[in-house]
Image: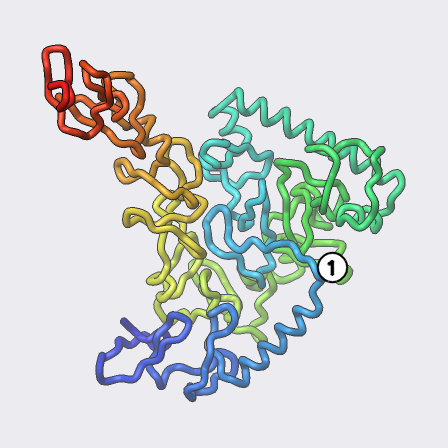
């Protein structure tokens, strides 16, 4: 094991070490991540377990957090923290859009077709059984019947959403529409039905066209607002924005990274993470894997600690990881993505909670009291019985694993079906004898 700061190995028994935030340091290497004050015995982890802070910086961070919480509205949308494609966490400081589809959020470059692995720019289609997404061309070739069904459903849902928004717009302005969608205005029974019937609670809507989203909408998320993919466009080239962007002071107009670069000379470098120009006289630049970063933007994809290019780190899904996160992170047996929140260990295998399913019926197994396993794959009790349970030689029905079983002459029986051939009383698990007409209990033998 080596020091998280200098990367020199520890000489056990001869050097003082300190462990904080799951990282171990030489005592003389640890310093405050904010003010660089040497370790004085009073350091604490921050609220996210990402930085080691001295007492002064800890108090400062708590004060900032308290002020931020006071400024927040009473209700906020639950934050999605991990990408549905690569499984890595989102960087809250990144100036890249994120994409959402069927309540799963993705990095802008992770919404890919499961078959051809290209970014999906058109409609998205989903295999309901395998929970995988496909582009129009691949899904049409894969399942023509399901393709036609989903296409028709998308068109119907879109028509309902548009009709609903048009009816609202006859009497409400943009501010009133937003208040209506937030549930702050009374909802008229005369309005046309939305998908799923009369709306209740909050309604997710596009901040550009003010139409509600329907099931299957491709949603772009940027600056704490949501847009239809086709509505979030660059003000200069009018193309949908698919990577980083800049925003106008009033927050109403956006410019894509390609158009932004036209304002600079060809030698200017732009940060891959935040999208801003890297000014040589102002910023320290880090070049890595053919990309450029501000020094403060070059961080571990998991713990968000700054990385020093001179130290050892690894690359996953084109994103850098620090050595400690590489050591600590477990991977799901099913999807092979990192397990960054709660997980399940079963039969020596690691699973995401949402990936721990019956390998036959795909039911979630998290709350199941009794499980079975076959060839290393988990099964619910019902599927295990249907696929692998013994069948009673007498009644030919399945003998559930939860019930007792009697084996006689190498044949399985329900205990209630294993009866004496003479008195017809159940023998169960008691001693029995084999007679010319069948099995006999002790009393009849």
Pick out the residue farthest to the top.
437
Which residue: 50% across, 68% down?
A: 48
Label 1 element class: loop
Q: Please name whichever residue, 426 or 243, is drawn nearer the observer in this view of the structure.
A: 426
Q: Quadrant of the N terminus?
A: bottom left
Which corner quadrant holds the C terminus? top left
Where does label 1 land, which residue?
248
Left or right of 336, for residue 256: right
Q: Position of residue 21 (x, y in %)?
A: 42, 72
Residue 325 figure quarter? bottom left
Q: Position of residue 384 (x, y in %)?
A: 32, 31
> How many tags in the picture?
1
Relative placement, left or right, of 425 versus 137 is left
Say which residue appears at 42% left-offset and 52% top-offset: 317
Q: Residue at x 46, y 31 (%)?
A: 129
From what the image shows, is residue 249 above or below residue 105? below
């Amino acid at each position: 094991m080596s020091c998280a700061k200098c990367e020199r190995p520890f000489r056990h028994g001869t050097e003082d070490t300190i462990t904080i935030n799951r990282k171990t340091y030489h005592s003389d290497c640890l310093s405050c991540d904010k003010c660089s004050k040497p370790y004085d015995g009073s350091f604490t982890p921050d609220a996210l377990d990402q930085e080691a802070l001295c007492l002064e910086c800890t108090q400062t961070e708590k004060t900032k957090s308290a002020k931020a919480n006071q400024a927040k509205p009473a209700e906020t949308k639950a934050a999605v923290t991990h990408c549905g494609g690569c499984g890595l966490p989102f960087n809250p400081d990144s100036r890249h859009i994120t994409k959402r589809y069927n309540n799963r959020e993705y990095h802008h470059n992770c919404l890919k077709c499961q078959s051809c692995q290209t970014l999906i720019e058109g409609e998205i289609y989903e295999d309901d059984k395998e929970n995988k997404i496909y582009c129009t061309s691949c899904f049409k070739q894969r399942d023509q019947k399901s393709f036609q069904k989903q296409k028709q459903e998308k068109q119907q849902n879109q028509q309902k959403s548009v009709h609903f928004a048009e009816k609202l717009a006859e009497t409400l302005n943009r501010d009133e529409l937003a208040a209506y969608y937030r549930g702050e205005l009374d909802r008229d029974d005369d309005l046309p039905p939305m998908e799923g019937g009369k709306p209740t609670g909050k309604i997710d809507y596009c901040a550009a066209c003010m139409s509600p989203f329907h099931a299957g909408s491709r949603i772009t998320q940027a600056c704490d607002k949501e847009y239809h993919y086709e509505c979030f466009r660059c003000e200069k080239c009018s193309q949908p924005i698919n990577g980083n962007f800049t925003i106008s002071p009033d927050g109403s107009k956006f410019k894509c990274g390609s158009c932004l670069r036209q304002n600079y000379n060809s030698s200017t470098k732009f940060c891959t993470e935040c999208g801003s120009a890297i000014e040589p006289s102002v910023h320290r630049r880090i070049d890595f894997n053919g990309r450029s970063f501000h020094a403060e933007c070059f961080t571990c994809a998991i713990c968000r600690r700054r990385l020093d290019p001179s130290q050892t780190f690894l690359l996953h899904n084109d994103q850098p990881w620090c050595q400690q996160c590489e050591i600590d992170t477990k991977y799901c047996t099913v999807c092979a993505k990192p397990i960054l929140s709660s997980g399940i260990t079963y039969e020596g295998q690691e699973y995401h909670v949402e990936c721990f399913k019956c390998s036959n019926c795909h039911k979630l197994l998290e709350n199941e009291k009794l499980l079975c396993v076959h060839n290393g794959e988990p099964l619910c009790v019902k599927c295990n019985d249907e696929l692998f349970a013994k069948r009673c030689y007498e009644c030919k029905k399945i003998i559930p694993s939860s019930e007792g079983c009697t084996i006689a002459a190498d044949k399985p029986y329900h205990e209630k079906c294993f009866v004496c051939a003479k008195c017809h009383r159940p023998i169960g698990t008691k001693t029995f004898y084999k007679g010319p007409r069948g099995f006999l209990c002790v009393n009849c033998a």
